[in-house]
Amino acid sequence: MMKLFLFLLYFVSLILPFVCVLVSVAFYTLVERKVLGYIMIRKGPNKVGYSGIMQPFSDAGKLFSKEYVMPGFANVVPFVLCPAVILFTSMMLWFLYPYSYVSMVFTCGIVQFLVTSGIHVYGVMVAGWSSNSKYSLLGAVRGVAQSISYEVPMTFVVLMVAFCIGSLWLQEVKMGQENMFSILTMSLLSSGVWVTCMLAETNRAPFDFVEGESELVSGFNVEYSSGGFAMIFMAEYGAMLFNSIFFITIFLGGNELLMSVSTMVWVLFFVWIRGTVPRIRYDQLMGLCWKVLLSVVLSMTGFVAIISFFF
């Protein structure tokens, strides 16, 4: 009986953080719709529950209760599995959360983040291909090119931060900035590069070419409905929340209270960008990555290497 109790306790402690993440995603969608509504001088959701607070749960119930439509020419097995794989990949990022007190840590958490975020593009690619639709395939191709391109400057920035701290352990990166300095104050330029790459990696405005409604109807997920669409939706917002936490961890650090407040600010930053910045052209997207951001991060990497060699 005791073994069963310990197993249930371990299972609940393992599952509970992911349940909390999904609940956070639900309320984040509500905050986004409210803020976008006020940006556009209109009301957001305000009918379901008090001031619309139950709207995300109403939407989730509606989505998961709808009929799952299977396209006639789709590749059935990868088409069905891809939403779950995309959601699972997004949830895997939360294993890297920099808890102050925890028994299980990743000693190379920064490398693990780069690996896990790089895997995400495979789910998008297979989802677009398996739908057997020209719109979804074009959205998947856009997503692959965009993610691979922006992973290059993002990797340079993250490894440069790890080099400055002297550790690949996220807990040490966070604690190293508590009493000494903040990487953000050292290099506003590198943090600006990271924010740009973060928007591109999560397919958010002004880099939302994967789901360009004006050209691709709805991008790589155009053939998905019901629970499949809901899982892709939750994975995207879960990745946005973790990327905000990761940004605060590697550039600000500090105690839990400071990180929590800063993360909420950066979460709202995603919404503000979506409501104010128009989508750029695709050639501008690629030019920004390979001509501007890559040149900047290579220059910064060389500068850091020279400084560390002499000092």
Image (spheres, helix red, strand yellow):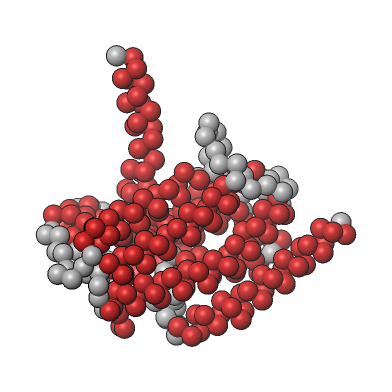
Compared across the picture, whether 51 is left or right of 89 comes to left
At x 32% / y 48%, what residue is drawn? Answer: 23
Taking depth in this image into account, of 154 and 148 the one nearest to the observer is: 148
Relative image position of residue 83 (x, y in whole percent): 29, 58
Taking depth in this image into account, of 181 and 99 the one nearest to the observer is: 99
At x 36% / y 21%, what residue is drawn? Answer: 6
Taking depth in this image into account, of 163 and 204 the one nearest to the observer is: 163
Compared across the picture, whether 72 is left or right of 56 comes to left
Compared across the picture, whether 50 is left or right of 15 comes to left
Relative image position of residue 31 (x, y in whole percent): 34, 60
Relative image position of residue 29 (x, y in whole percent): 32, 59
- In the displayed structure, 220 sits above or below 114; it is below
At x 36% / y 61%, what residue is drawn? Answer: 123
Compared across the picture, whether 40 is left or right of 173 comes to left
Taking depth in this image into account, of 256 and 104 the one nearest to the observer is: 104
- In the displayed structure, 41 sits above or below 306; it is below
- In the displayed structure, 99 sits above or below 92; it is above
Q: Residue 220: which quarter of the image?
A: bottom left
At x 47% / y 44%, what residue is drawn? Answer: 95
Q: Residue furthest left?
A: 67
Q: Residue furthest right?
A: 310
Could one spot residue 2 in this view of the protein?
yes
